[in-house]
Image (cartoon, coloured by chain):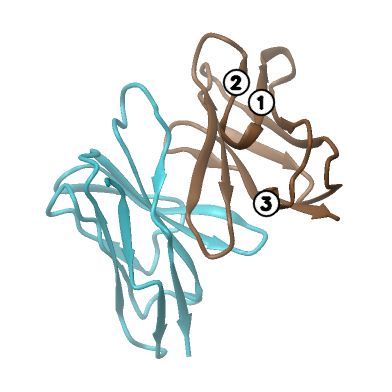
Chain colours: A brown, B cyan
Amino acid sequence: AQSVTQLGSHVSVSEGALVLLRCNYSSSVPPYLFWYVQYPNQGLQLLLKYTTGATLVKGINGFEAEFKKSETSFHLTKPSAHMSDAAEYFCAVRDKIIFGKGTRLHILP
Amino acid sequence: DGGITQSPKYLFRKEGQNVTLSCEQNLNHDAMYWYRQDPGQGLRLIYYSQIVNDFQKGDIAEGYSVSREKKESFPLTVTSAQKNPTAFYLCASRADAQGIDYGYTFGSGTRLTVV
């Protein structure tokens, strides 16, 4: 069975600071991993995905994530937060895609 | 532009009534999905369909029904048997349910409120 755990339902960072959203997964098969972003009253938009190959994956809006098999992690980072990054972020693992419960990112001015 | 269209964006229903949420895609995707989103609970899978005329129950199918008569369309009916239907409903599609996974494309959602 597959599952996803996102640490922290709310994360606050100052504008310009590093963004780190944590995601750990469990999967009995090689995972495909995804990060999605959701703005209020909208659907989810794909930020980035890992399937095979390079473990550091770059996505849209300056986000990136690194697949670490030994740690079963796929944490999302961005070097410098912008006010427009305030949203809810979902980590997901494939096969009917199992979603984490989401992390709401707050950007402090 | 290709995409997924959900309608209506906001929907109000009286208790005891059935209501149908529309989901249409022009991406030529095989697989389509319905999720329910509640605050603090993330997304929960209601139903999914990997091919026309076939669909499978997800984790919370009770009180819901679907049909997949056309590749482009996957309507969701919220029946009066659904005990707590007020939620945000998201429809999604995926290019190939069995092969390479490009991730989901989501609609913009329908917010259903029971009054």
Number of numbered discs overlaid on the protein picture:
3
Q: Position of residue B62 (x, y in %)?
A: 40, 64
Chain identifier of the residue bearing label 1 in the image:
A
Query: As drawn, is A93 to the left or to the right of A103?
Result: left
Asked if residue B85 can be seen in this view, the reply is: yes
Return the residue at label 2.
A57
Q: Are marks 2 and 1 in contact (CB under 8 Å)?
A: yes
Return the residue at label 3.
A84
Assess disc 2: are there few (<14), some (14-19) or many (≥20) residues with their C-alpha within 10 Å of its C-alpha.
some
Chain identifier of the residue bearing label 3 in the image:
A
Marked residue nearer the N-terminal end (2 or 3): 2
Residue A2, quarter of the rendered image: top right
Measured in 3D between alpha carbons, the distance from the residue under mark 1 to the one under mark 3, in whole angstroms, is 19 Å
Return the residue at label 1.
A65
Q: Amino acid at mark 2?
A: Val
Q: Secondary structure at mark 1?
A: strand
Residue lying at the far top in this picture: please name it.
A53
Camera-side residue of A61 and B44? A61
Q: Position of residue A50 (x, y in %)?
A: 54, 22
Asked if residue A1 can be seen in this view, the reply is: no
Compared to residue B96, the image places residue A17 above or below, namely: below
Picture residue at 64% right of the left edge, 46% below the top: A89
Picture residue at 37% right of the left edge, 88% below the top: B16
Q: Amino acid at mark 3?
A: Ser
Residue B61, quarter of the rendered image: bottom left
Chain identifier of the residue bearing label 2 in the image:
A
Q: Position of residue A36 (x, y in %)?
A: 56, 42
Residue A91, quarter of the rendered image: top right
Assess disc 1: are there few (<14), some (14-19) or many (≥20) residues with their C-alpha within 10 Å of its C-alpha.
many
